[in-house]
Amino acid sequence: FRAGLYQDLGNSLQPGRNYRLAGLFAVTGSASGDDVRFALEIRENGQTRFQYLETLSVDDSRLTNYSTTFSLEATRPAGVGLVIFGPEAQVTLYADDISLTAI
């Protein structure tokens, strides 16, 4: 992973339920913009794996709206974390108004 954000969600997500992840994202320091990637870090059965969500392409210095829906791909997770990453070194990631809601 490149530099980014991490939020431990504990056991707040339940398998089989649908969720929406939304927010505003931008980068600075990139001549042509960059991709922001989103993943769930799932801890289950003594192992850690990642469930990747939709990628967002953003332009330099302009907030871009992101919204995606997903269902947690796990049976009995011990915990889940949200990982937001992507910009290369020397590129700053901005995030605002991030929400994760059950739908």
Image (cartoon, rainbow, N blue to C red):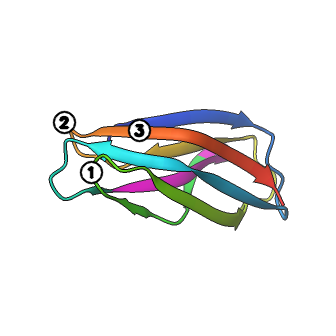
Q: Tell us which disc is closer to us: 2 or 3.
A: 3
Can you name the residue that lies furthest to the left here? Answer: 31
Q: Amino acid at mark 3?
A: Tyr
Q: Residue at x 64, y 33 (%)?
A: 8
Above or below residue 6? Residue 17 is below
Q: Tell us which disc is closer to us: 1 or 2.
A: 1
Can you name the residue that lies furthest to the front here? Answer: 62
Give the mark nearer the N terminus: 1 vs 2.
Answer: 1
Look at mark 3 in the image and give the residue it sits on: 94
Q: Amino acid at mark 1?
A: Asp
As measured in the structure, the alpha-carbon distance from the residue carrying label 1 to the one carrying label 2 is 13 Å
Name the image quarter holding residue 16. Answer: bottom right
User: What span is colored magenta in the figure?
Assistant: 35-47
28 relative position to 4: left or right: left
In the rendered image, residue 75, in percent from the top left (x then y), is placed at: 80, 59
As measured in the structure, the alpha-carbon distance from the residue carrying label 2 to the one carrying label 3 is 13 Å
37 and 33: which one is in front?
33
50 and 99: which one is in front?
99
Look at mark 1 in the image and give the residue it sits on: 60
**Does the rendering let one see residue 53?**
yes
As measured in the structure, the alpha-carbon distance from the residue carrying label 3 to the one carrying label 1 is 10 Å
91 relative position to 100: left or right: left
